[in-house]
Image (cartoon, coloured by chain):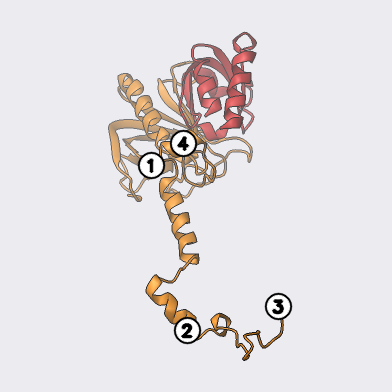
C-alpha cells in the first residue's frame, strides 16, 4: 500500500522504470494501480540498442510484476511525507 | 475458454507481426479477461494466444520509420513465447523478451485496443501481488479488525481452537466424576483421623 500511495503522488512526473529484463523506460507517469502496473506517456527507452522497436512507442502499460526499480525524480521526493508514511506502515 | 474467462473485446481486422518481422497476415483479435488471442482470417488452423500474466508491457507505436503501420507493440515474458500453434520456436535470445505487433487495419482502433489491453491486464495480477489482499495475512491492526479484516479466517481459527477445548456439559459432569477414584472421599478411621495419617492429630 505504501508504494501504491506514494507512486500516486508522482503522477505527472517523469520517472524511469527498470524492468527485470534490463529494459529501462523513461516517461511521464500517467497512472499506477494497486498491483503497481504502471502507465507511462512520452516514453523514451534508455537502452535502445537492446530493444530498438521500443523507440517507436509513445505510451505504454507495464505489468507491475516485471518492474525491478522505479527511479524517482529527486525533486519530488518529500522525505518528511515518506518518513511519516513508513512509520505508519510499520505500526500498522 | 479457460476457467472464469470472458470475452471482453473483438477487433475483427488486425494483422499479427512477430518479432522477427514475419507478417502472419490479417486476422481477428480477441481480448478476453485472461488472454489475448489472434486467429488468422486466411487459415482457420492458424492462431495463437498469450495469457496476460506473460505480457510484460504493451504500447502504442506510431513511428512509421520503424514499422510501416501504427500498431500495438507487445513485449512478452521470455521463455513463454507467444504459444504459436504453428509450433515455431521463438528466435530470440534467452534474455531478450519476445516482441509481437498487432496492426489494426483501422488505425483509429489503436486507442481502443490499448485501453482494452490495459483493463484486462489489470484483472490478472500475479499470484502474491495482491497488495491489499486479506488472504494469507495473519496480523491485522485494530482498525482492520474493526473493519472486519480477515473475518472469515479468524472465525475458522477460533472454531479450530474451540474444537480442542471440548468441555462436558453440566449433566455429563456427575457421570464423569462417578467412577473417577480421584474424586472419592478419603477413608477415615473411627477417631475421625484420615487413615493415611497425613492430617495433624486433632487436639484432645
Rounded to the nearest angstrom, the CA distance separating label 4 from label 2 is: 49 Å
Rounded to the nearest angstrom, the CA distance separating label 4 from label 3 is: 66 Å
Element carrying mark 1:
loop
Of labels 1 and 4, earlier in sequence is 1
Element carrying mark 3:
loop
Q: Are dots 4 and 3 on a single chain?
A: yes
The residue pinned by badge 3 equals B203
Chain at tag 3: B
- Residue found farthest to the bottom: B190
The residue pinned by badge 4 equals B144
Chain at tag 4: B
Rounded to the nearest angstrom, the CA distance separating label 2 from label 1 is: 66 Å
> For the residue carrying disc 4, how many other residues have a C-alpha within 10 Å: few (<14), some (14-19), or many (20+)?
few
Of labels 2 and 1, earlier in sequence is 1
Question: Disc 3 vs disc 2: Cβ atoms closer than 8 Å?
Answer: no
Of labels 4 and 2, earlier in sequence is 4
The residue pinned by badge 1 equals B34
Colour in which the image shows chain B: orange
Front-lying residue, B13 or B141? B141
> For the residue carrying disc 3, how many other residues have a C-alpha within 10 Å: few (<14), some (14-19), or many (20+)?
few
> For the residue carrying disc 1, how many other residues have a C-alpha within 10 Å: few (<14), some (14-19), or many (20+)?
many
Residue A45 visible, this angle:
no
Chain at tag 2: B
**Residue located at (64% from left, 23% from top):** A49
Amino acid at each position: 500500500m505504501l508504494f501504491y500511495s506514494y507512486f500516486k503522488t508522482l503522477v505527472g512526473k517523469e520517472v524511469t522504470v527498470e524492468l527485470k529484463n534490463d529494459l529501462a523506460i523513461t516517461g511521464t507517469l500517467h497512472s499506477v494501480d494497486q498491483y503497481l502496473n504502471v502507465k507511462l506517456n512520452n516514453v523514451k527507452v534508455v537502452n535502445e540498442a537492446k530493444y530498438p522497436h521500443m523507440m517507436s512507442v509513445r505510451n505504454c502499460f507495464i505489468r507491475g510484476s516485471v518492474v525491478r526499480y522505479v527511479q524517482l525524480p529527486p525533486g519530488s521526493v518529500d522525505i518528511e511525507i515518506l518518513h511519516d508514511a513508513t512509520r505508519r506502515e510499520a505500526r500498522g | 475458454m479457460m476457467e472464469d474467462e470472458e470475452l471482453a473485446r473483438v477487433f475483427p481486422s488486425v494483422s499479427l507481426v512477430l518479432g522477427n518481422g514475419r507478417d502472419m497476415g490479417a486476422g481477428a483479435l480477441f481480448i478476453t479477461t485472461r488472454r489475448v488471442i489472434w486467429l488468422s482470417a486466411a487459415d482457420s488452423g492458424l492462431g495463437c494466444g498469450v495469457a496476460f500474466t506473460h505480457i510484460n508491457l504493451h504500447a502504442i507505436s506510431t513511428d512509421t520509420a520503424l514499422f510501416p503501420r501504427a500498431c500495438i507493440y507487445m513485449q512478452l515474458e521470455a521463455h513463454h513465447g507467444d504459444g504459436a500453434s504453428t509450433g515455431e520456436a521463438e528466435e530470440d535470445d534467452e534474455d531478450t523478451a519476445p516482441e509481437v505487433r498487432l496492426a489494426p487495419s483501422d488505425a483509429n482502433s489503436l486507442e481502443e485496443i490499448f485501453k482494452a489491453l490495459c483493463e484486462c491486464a489489470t484483472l490478472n495480477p500475479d499470484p502474491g501481488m495482491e497488495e491489499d489482499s486479506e488472504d494469507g495475512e495473519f496480523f491485522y491492526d485494530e482498525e482492520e479488525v474493526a473493519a472486519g479484516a480477515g473475518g472469515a479466517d479468524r472465525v475458522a481459527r477460533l472454531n479450530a481452537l474451540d474444537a480442542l477445548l471440548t468441555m462436558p456439559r453440566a449433566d455429563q459432569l456427575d457421570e464423569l466424576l462417578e467412577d473417577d477414584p480421584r474424586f472419592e472421599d478419603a477413608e477415615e478411621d473411627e477417631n475421625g483421623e484420615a487413615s493415611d495419617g497425613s492430617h495433624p492429630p486433632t487436639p484432645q
